[in-house]
Image (tube, rainbow, N blue to C red):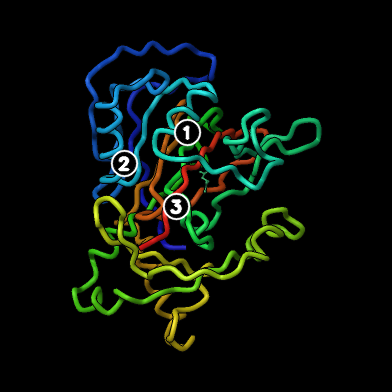
């Protein structure tokens, strides 16, 4: 794997326990870039509150513009996370019902925690670079991931997630190369191989028919263009022989995840992070294990057919 990007500095003292109270003053919404090409931190909003249409519009605009948004130190109930996510679109119900939060089918639990001998969540989500569910006809717009327990070792939070701007990667290509990619369509396949043998998700994806999507995807609101291929999930490019298409897919996929296009998020308890699947790819770093516990609640917003 290519060198990983540096860890961004975290401001303020992280809460040590989810039950530790937080006092949130209502301030003015502020937006701060998290890296050169992707991600912004939004402060001055309490997502547990009923946000005005004006504040929500600013957040939605920032989501479209920065592709990854981070809201630190939030204290959200499952209902509040669902209500905030719902403002961005219809919610997706994960087929992985065994990992849904009890009574909340909209929330998928990602966790390494075992209770009564059983995993309470999906322990290995996102361990390879990907954009979510590109093997479906209408991949999700994005997901909102909320940190409820973070593994901490020697004072350092583990289990970072890295986001890459596939838009910045496209924009860095020479104009003639960009032009040669427009109009190409890649074939996406849900690879059962990347899931553990016998895994339920592996069983689910293996029967999904291949889908075609543009190699260069256009953001439905901003019109920005981004590379939309991933090695392993793209098995070819329409009307192009494999000996040409497979190296091109690898070249483009490697381009997206170059460290200069990445933001590496070091999680703090109560972080709510959301990403836009059309413009980014992401990777969850697996550098912790029990007894260090990680517990995240993920809500996913439906998307539109890639154009
Ligand atoms: C994912 O790909 O949804 C997992 C991200 C994470 O757990 O950091």
In the displayed structure, would residue 252 be above or below residue 245? above
The single residue placed furthest to the left in the displayed view is 175
Question: Along the line of sight, which residue is nearer the eye, 89 or 61?
Answer: 89
* Residue marked by disc 1: 156
Q: Residues within 10 Å of mark 3 (few under 14, many from 20)?
A: many
Residue 189 position in % (x across, y down):
56, 68
* Residue marked by disc 3: 282
Dot 3 or dot 2, earlier in sequence? 2
Residue 63, label in figure = 2
Q: Residues within 10 Å of mark 2 (few under 14, many from 20)?
A: many
The single residue placed furthest to the right in the displayed view is 117
Whether disc 3's CB lies below 8 Å from ligand 1 is answered yes
Q: Secondary structure at mark 2?
A: helix
Q: Are marks 1 and 3 in contact (CB under 8 Å)?
A: no
Dot 1 or dot 3, earlier in sequence? 1
The nearer-to-camera label among 3 and 2 is: 2
Residue 191 position in % (x across, y down):
61, 66
Dot 2 or dot 1, earlier in sequence? 2
In the displayed structure, would residue 143 be above or below residue 223? above
Instruction: Identify the residue at horizontal 74%, vertical 60% (top origin).
Output: 197
Q: Secondary structure at mark 3?
A: strand
Estimate the spatial distance between the alpha carbons at disc 2 and disc 1, rounded to whole Å. 28 Å
The nearer-to-camera label among 2 and 1 is: 2
């Amino acid at each position: 794997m290519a060198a990983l990007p540096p860890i961004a500095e975290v401001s303020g003292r992280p809460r040590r326990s989810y039950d530790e109270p937080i006092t949130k003053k209502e301030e003015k919404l502020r937006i701060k870039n998290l890296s050169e090409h992707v991600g912004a931190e939004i402060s001055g909003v309490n997502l547990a509150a009923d946000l005005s249409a004006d504040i929500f519009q600013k957040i939605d605009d920032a989501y479209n513009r920065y592709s990854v948004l981070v809201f630190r130190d939030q204290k959200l109930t499952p209902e509040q996370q669902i209500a905030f996510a719902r403002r961005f679109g219809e919610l997706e119900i994960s087929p992985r019902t065994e990992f849904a939060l009890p009574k909340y089918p909209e929330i998928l639990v990602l966790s390494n925690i075992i209770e009564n001998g059983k995993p309470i969540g999906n322990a290995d989500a996102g361990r390879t670079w990907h954009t979510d569910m590109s093997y479906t006809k209408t991949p999700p717009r994005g997901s909102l991931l909320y940190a409820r327990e973070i593994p901490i070792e020697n004072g350092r939070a583990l289990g970072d997630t890295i986001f890459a701007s596939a838009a910045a990667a496209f924009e860095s290509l020479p104009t003639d190369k960009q032009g040669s990619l427009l109009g190409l369509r890649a074939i996406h396949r849900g690879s059962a191989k990347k899931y553990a043998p016998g895994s339920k998700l592996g069983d689910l994806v293996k029967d999904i028919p291949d889908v075609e999507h543009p190699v260069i995807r256009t953001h439905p609101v901003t019109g920005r263009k981004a590379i939309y291929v991933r090695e392993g999930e793209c098995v070819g490019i329409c009307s192009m022989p494999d000996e040409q298409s497979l190296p091109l897919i690898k070249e483009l996929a490697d381009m997206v995840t170059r460290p200069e296009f990445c933001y590496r998020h070091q999680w703090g308890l109560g972080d709510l992070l959301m990403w836009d699947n059309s413009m980014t790819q992401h990777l969850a770093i697996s550098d912790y294990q029990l007894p260090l516990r990680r517990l995240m609640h993920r809500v996913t917003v439906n998307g539109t057919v890639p154009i």
